[in-house]
């Protein structure tokens, strides 16, 4: 997935394939959960923060067809000390909502971030605007 900023949202486009179906012709719900988790976690980029999932609640609204482009978006609903509450959705390109989610995303501890940067120095500017 390639993520981009659109105003105060993090957005990604995604087209599922046949090998990701749960039922014939329908995207597996675990893939939808992953799309939401990854996109909502990246709302930290809006504040130059590294986040990890603390809680994720998903409401599936309708089956997601495979081989049809969809858009995933997320935004910050509320900020608090050490955490961000985010909301997001997976939508078909006509705006039909496939799933929506709310989640609590915790700021990554400084020591974890430092260890990651020591292993992967190319991430030092990861959240630069």
Image (tube, rainbow, N blue to C red):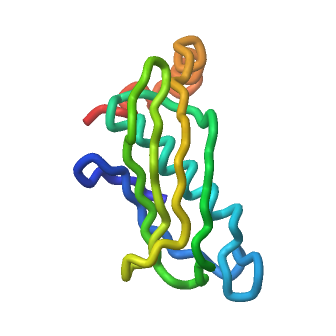
Which residue lies most toward the top here? 111
Q: Which image quadrant: the C terminus?
A: top left
Residue 12 relative to residue 33: left or right: left
In which quadrant of the rendered view does residue 42 lie? top left
| Residue 19 screen position, x and y as percent | 72, 77
| Residue 110 screen position, x and y as percent | 52, 13
| Residue 100 screen position, x and y as percent | 52, 60
Residue 48 relative to residue 22: left or right: left
The relative height of residue 64 versus residue 81 in the rendered view (above or below) is below
Residue 121 relative to residue 33: left or right: left
Q: Report how many numbered discs are placed on residues in the image.
A: 0
- Identity of the residue drawn at 59% across and 77% down: 62
- Identity of the residue drawn at 48% across and 19% down: 82
Q: Nearer the viewer, residue 88 or 3?
A: 88
The relative height of residue 52 versus residue 1 in the rendered view (above or below) is above
| Residue 78 screen position, x and y as percent | 39, 34
- Identity of the residue drawn at 43% across and 57% down: 2
The relative height of residue 51 versus residue 81 in the rendered view (above or below) is below
Q: Nearer the viewer, residue 75 or 108?
A: 75
Which residue lies most toward the bottom here? 25
In which quadrant of the rendered view does residue 65 lie? bottom right
- Identity of the residue drawn at 50% across and 41% down: 41
């Amino acid at each position: 997935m390639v993520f981009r900023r659109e105003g105060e949202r993090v957005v990604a486009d995604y087209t599922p394939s046949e090998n990701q179906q749960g039922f014939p012709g329908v995207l597996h719900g675990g893939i939808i959960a992953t799309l939401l988790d990854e996109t909502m976690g990246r709302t930290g980029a809006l504040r130059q923060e590294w986040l990890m999932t603390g809680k994720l609640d998903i409401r599936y609204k309708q089956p997601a067809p495979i081989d049809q482009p969809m858009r995933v978006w997320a935004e910050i609903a509320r900020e608090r000390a050490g955490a961000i509450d985010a909301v997001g959705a997976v939508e078909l390109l006509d705006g039909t909502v496939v799933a929506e989610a709310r989640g609590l995303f915790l700021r990554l501890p400084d020591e974890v971030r430092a260890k990651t940067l020591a292993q992967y120095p190319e991430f030092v500017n990861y959240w630069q605007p």
